[in-house]
Image (tube, rainbow, N blue to C red):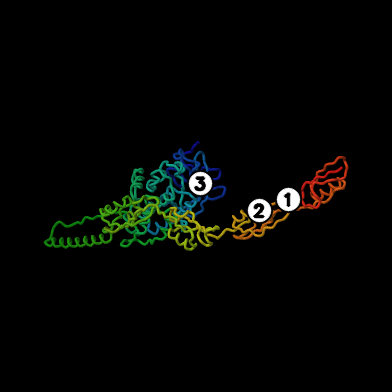
Amino acid sequence: MTTTTGDLTGARVDGRYRLQRLIARGGMADVYEAHDERLDRTVAVKIITNAAVAGFDMKAFANEAKTIARLSHPNVVAVFDQGVHEGLPYVVMEYVPGTTLRDLLNRRRRLRIEEAVEVCGQLLDGLQAAHDAGLMHRDIKPENILLKKGGRGDRVKVVDFGLAEAVHGDRDTAGPLVATAAYVAPELVNGKPATTASDVYSTAILLYELLTGEVPFDGADSGAVARRHVDEDVPSPQLKAPDVPDSLAELVTTAAARRPGSRPVDAGAFLRRLQAIDVKPAPNSTGKVPRPTRVVQTTMVVDSPRSKRSWKALLTLGLIAVLLVGVAAAGWWIGIGRYTSTPSLLDQTQESVGAYAEDQGFEVDLVDGYSESVPVGQIVSQDPGVGDRIRRGSTITVVISQGPERYQVPNLAGMTEDKAQGELAKFDAEVKVDHEYSVDIPAGEITRTDPPAGEEVKAGTPVTLFVSDGFPPLQVPDVVGRSEDDAVSELDAEGLAIGEITRSNSDTIDAGLVISQTPAAQAPAGPGDTVDLVVSDGPEPVEVPDVLGMDIEEATEKLEGLGFKVKTAQIWFTGTVFDQSLDAGTEHPKGSEIWLWAR
């Protein structure tokens, strides 16, 4: 792969994108304002730099670009195209005239509370569109948030989905840390793959910065900063900015919880909670954005000659100073001093949490709760949350894990459907209803459940109720050709009654076998319905004629016409019958054999 270095202004990418000016330069990529000569529009072209291209995963980059290109949201920078220019991967994006959120913070240090909530809300709105598409950003920070000039509902634009991951490798494996240390989620530091909760964490850190003017963890050593996300809880932004409302401060620390499962599950969940917050400044605060500290002259200049009354003036000033200090101390205690940050009790157990909280100056109220992930006896959650503002000596409610919530599916057989529904409602079960026939359970009652009675399941597990439709409808079995006894036994086994049995001759059905049935085979029937049978008596009997004295050929023709099988014995080729084996006037079945003798 050949590569190009330096400023590419003036170059023509893919025969259509004319790079007009360099508008941003970063550690991984340069961004140019460009003109799309084919569609006659202004676009932004981001080209991966020569320094970053060595570890670049082109396949991941292309897949990310295709996924982002399918997004259509006013708070997400649109992606139009991607490819490689002289060995350097590039992506073509929507051109957003304006500035970055980092530039704004550099000018103003922090935002007003309502501004911070509005910017974060638009960011989360765009981020949720990506989460719904199965795409994580992985590098939320002010540099990746664009502020469009003159915009309102679409003022905030999120850019660079997955770019860092494409540069550094496979997102599903534990590779190098690809996020910015000040905003990185703890699970990424530990080498786990990014999830929607990882973006929630980074967004919470960004909101913390918008509210306070600084990130919670910072320093020259990015590795040490990243480890602090793993080892320390994010403090309440109220410690840096007392005007932040309690509910907003609590949401920031919740969304920045070290455990992914304790955060809002995705950007949409975060946004819904953010929109429910009253952004009025906290009581006893000015509601104004603090300015950077200025050095002021505080030395009082006093004339050296002292008058006789200087001690009185000094005493008066001292009393005033003491009074002011007392008033200030009282105000500080009422407004700030009696409050502190809630300590973390999450690493304690049911046995140790009481003593630990007492050492910290708090009481605890233990309540039971269920958890799929927290072992029995350990702490699931606490209220107030870690880092929240709390009065010294207050009570902290602690939820103790009882393990996974399970219940046994009750035995509902024989209950009515309504009563069974009521029993399952106690466990928040998702109930489905199906119907089946039953020979034991009357119509309208429960025959069984799936999962079966006695099985342990989670609360909310779907349970299917099978409701009886009564005795199953029958189909008449086919007994034609069966012996009379066998036919009667089979019909009886099916719950059917035997009706009239008649007999009839048949040239094709042997005697004793069923010729026909009514109703016919496979006809529907109910329990106890009757079935009539016709049983064969074999072929119909025929009276033997007297053929003595007849020509043998004539006698043979007559007997065969009546259905007999004729055998002959004669001396000459022609002759007269003088004897027959079956006596004339007797009856025999068709097909019977008869001998004729002639001479």
Helix or strand or loop: what does disc 1 sit on? loop
Quadrant into which the C terminus falls = top right
Mark 1 vs 2, N-terminal side: 2
Q: Nearer the viewer, mark 2 or mark 3?
A: 2
Mark 3 vs 1, N-terminal side: 3
Q: Residue at x 54, y 62 (%)?
A: 443
Mark 2 vs 3, N-terminal side: 3
Q: Position of residue 512 (x, y in %)?
A: 68, 52
**Residue 65: mark in rendering:** 3
Relative placement, left or right, of 39 versus 591 is left
Residue that mark 2 sits on: 484
Q: Closer to the camera, 463 or 365? A: 463
Q: Position of residue 578 (x, y in %)?
A: 85, 45
Relative placement, left or right, of 408 versus 240 is right
Q: Is residue 181 above or below residue 274?
A: above
Q: Position of residue 380 (x, y in %)?
A: 36, 53
* Pointer 3 local density, CA inside 10 Å: few below 14, some 14–19, many at least 20: many
Q: Check disc 3 and give the amino acid type.
A: Ala
Helix or strand or loop: what does disc 3 sit on? helix
Rounded to the nearest angstrom, the CA distance separating label 1 from label 2 is 16 Å
Q: Closer to the camera, 508 or 549? A: 549
**Residue 88: mark in rendering:** none
Helix or strand or loop: what does disc 2 sit on? helix
Q: Is residue 317 above or below residue 203?
A: below
Residue that mark 1 sits on: 508
Relative placement, left or right, of 205 versus 534 is left
